[in-house]
Image (cartoon, rainbow, N blue to C red):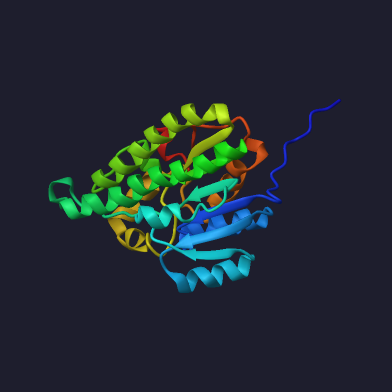
């Protein structure tokens, strides 16, 4: 008998996506819903979130995930899939980093990500399966000018995910990261508008173009699905070859 390709479909599965009101998080929510998942969209801004949830047939839950009490309240029942696309960048020279900027970046990129993983895993362990996916960055594997704080947060996330994968693997709970290169979103447009920064990007992306949100949608469905049943503790780099050098 020939082997059967595992399904990429997510019918009947409950998914939660943070940062779902725009950009990469929005793309993740659309992708999971398109694969059949029942998606709960989470972000701070209620207005855009409710419109997106309506369009994909999901549910909108406004929440600031840096508020750990509010975060815990998201998990009234176990989810099969949790995608964390919320994040923050405050770029600038390392010599000029202010403590408030450091704390703000770490609060959402690392602290909230850690306790979101913990809350998600508790429900997943109880049901004996689950997939947690964090939107990390190529900058979790390399360095970049004016990005010391951001790189620190994403390198830490990568280590966190590896350790959690070892602990939760016996319970069939998988946890991975997706590591994009520079993706065109409203938040990254200032970088693309700077000629020097744009030239730096193009020199380092082997495929010769910036990423689009659509470049990440297949990756998130893959890691959420049975097609990735043997994938945990892994960084899936969607970086156009940036880290290949």
In terms of depth relative to the viewer, which is nearer, 6 or 70?
70
Identify the residue at horizontal 51%, vertical 31% (top origin): 168
Which image quarter is the C terminus in? top left
Identify the residue at horizontal 31%, vertical 54% (top origin): 89
- Residue 214 visible to the viewer: no
Q: Is residue 23 left or right of residue 12?
A: left
In terms of depth relative to the viewer, which is nearer, 231 or 151?
231
Q: Which percent across, then down, holds residue 183?
A: 44, 54
- Residue 6 visible to the viewer: yes
Identify the residue at horizontal 61%, vertical 47% (top origin): 221
Q: Which percent across, then down, holds residue 131?
A: 56, 41
Q: Quadrant of residue 137?
A: top left
186 is higher (above) or lower (below) than 142: below
Q: Residue furthest right?
A: 1
Q: Quadrant of residue 226?
A: top right
Which image quarter is the N terminus in? top right
Q: Which percent across, then down, holds residue 146?
A: 23, 48
Q: Is residue 2 left or right of residue 70?
A: right
- The number of discs equals 0
Identify the residue at horizontal 62%, vertical 65% (top origin): 56
Q: Which percent across, then down, holds residue 70?
A: 40, 58
């Amino acid at each position: 008998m020939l082997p059967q390709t595992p399904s990429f479909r997510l019918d009947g599965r409950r998914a939660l996506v943070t940062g779902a009101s725009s950009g990469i998080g929005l793309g993740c929510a659309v992708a999971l819903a398109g694969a059949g998942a029942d998606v709960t969209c989470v972000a701070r801004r209620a207005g855009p979130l409710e419109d997106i949830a309506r369009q994909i047939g999901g549910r909108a839950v406004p929440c600031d995930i840096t508020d750990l009490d509010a975060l815990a309240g998201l998990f009234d029942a176990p989810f099969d899939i949790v995608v964390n696309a919320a994040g923050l960048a405050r770029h600038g020279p390392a010599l000029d980093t202010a403590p408030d900027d450091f704390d703000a970046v770490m609060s959402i990129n690392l602290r909230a990500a850690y306790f979101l993983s913990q809350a998600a895993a508790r429900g997943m362990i109880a049901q004996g399966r689950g997939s947690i996916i964090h939107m990390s960055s190529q900058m979790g594997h390399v360095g970049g000018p004016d990005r010391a704080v951001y790189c620190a947060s994403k390198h830490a996330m990568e280590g966190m995910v590896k350790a959690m994968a070892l602990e939760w693997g016996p319970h069939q709970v998988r946890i991975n990261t997706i590591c994009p290169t520079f993706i065109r979103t409203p938040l990254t447009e200032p970088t693309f508008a700077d000629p020097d920064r744009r030239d730096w990007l193009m020199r380092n992306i082997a495929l010769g173009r910036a990423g689009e949100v659509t470049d990440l949608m297949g990756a998130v469905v893959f890691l959420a699905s049975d097609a990735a049943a043997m994938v945990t503790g892994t960084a899936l780099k969607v970086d156009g070859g940036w880290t290949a050098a």
